[in-house]
Image: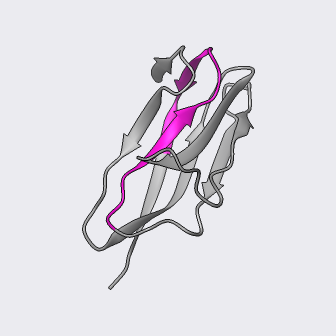
């Protein structure tokens, strides 16, 4: 299949929900388009450490990883599109860490 397609407008995003007692620590994406950029931000638009904007590989099976080191517990984060091109994501893995 073609995977998830979204975007076309700078600032479009996919949202990762706030989970009680958990923080988002990792995002891995397979697939992409040429000249597509992503960053990881909280819901107020603040970029998180490890989520700095980066270009996604254009190869069908390219892998891009975000190792998020300073995310907060109970906080929504977003994978934000930084270009006007439509994005294609074949697979995505996300990891939350329990914080008690």
Residue furthest bottom in the image: 100
Is residue 1 something one can see in this rendering? Answer: no
Which of 33 and 17 lies nearest the eye of the viewer? 17
- Residue 35 location (% of width, % of height): 75, 22
State the image quarter where residue 31 is shown.
Answer: top right
Residue displayed at 28% across by 62% down: 19
Q: Position of residue 48 (x, y in %)?
A: 58, 57
In this picture the colour scheme is: one colour
Determine the image quadrant of residue 99. Answer: bottom left
Q: Residue at x 48, y 26 (%)?
A: 12
The image shows residue 65, relative to residue 90, as above or below, that is below
Q: Could you tell me if residue 84 is visible in this image? A: yes
**Position in image of residue 95 (x %, y %):** 45, 61
Between 54 and 43, the one nearer to me in the picture = 43
Instruction: Say whether residue 80 is magenta.
Output: yes
In-image side of 3 versus 57 (left or right): left
**Image quarter hosting the C terminus:** bottom left
| The magenta segment | 74-92
| Residue at 59%, 50% in the rendered image | 47
Would residue 44 appear left or right of 51 to someone viewing this image?
Answer: left
Q: Position of residue 27 (x, y in %)?
A: 54, 51
Total tally of numbered discs in the picture: 0
Residue 10 in magenta stretch: no
């Amino acid at each position: 299949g073609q995977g998830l397609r979204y975007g076309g407008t700078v600032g479009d995003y996919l949202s990762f929900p706030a989970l009680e007692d958990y923080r988002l620590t990792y995002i891995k994406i397979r697939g992409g388009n040429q000249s597509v950029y992503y960053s990881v931000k909280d819901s107020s638009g603040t970029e998180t450490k490890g989520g700095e904007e980066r270009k996604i590989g254009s190869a069908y099976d390219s892998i891009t990883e975000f190792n998020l080191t300073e995310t907060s517990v109970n906080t929504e984060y977003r994978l934000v599109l930084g270009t006007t091109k439509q994005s294609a994501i074949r697979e995505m893995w996300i990891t939350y860490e329990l914080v008690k």
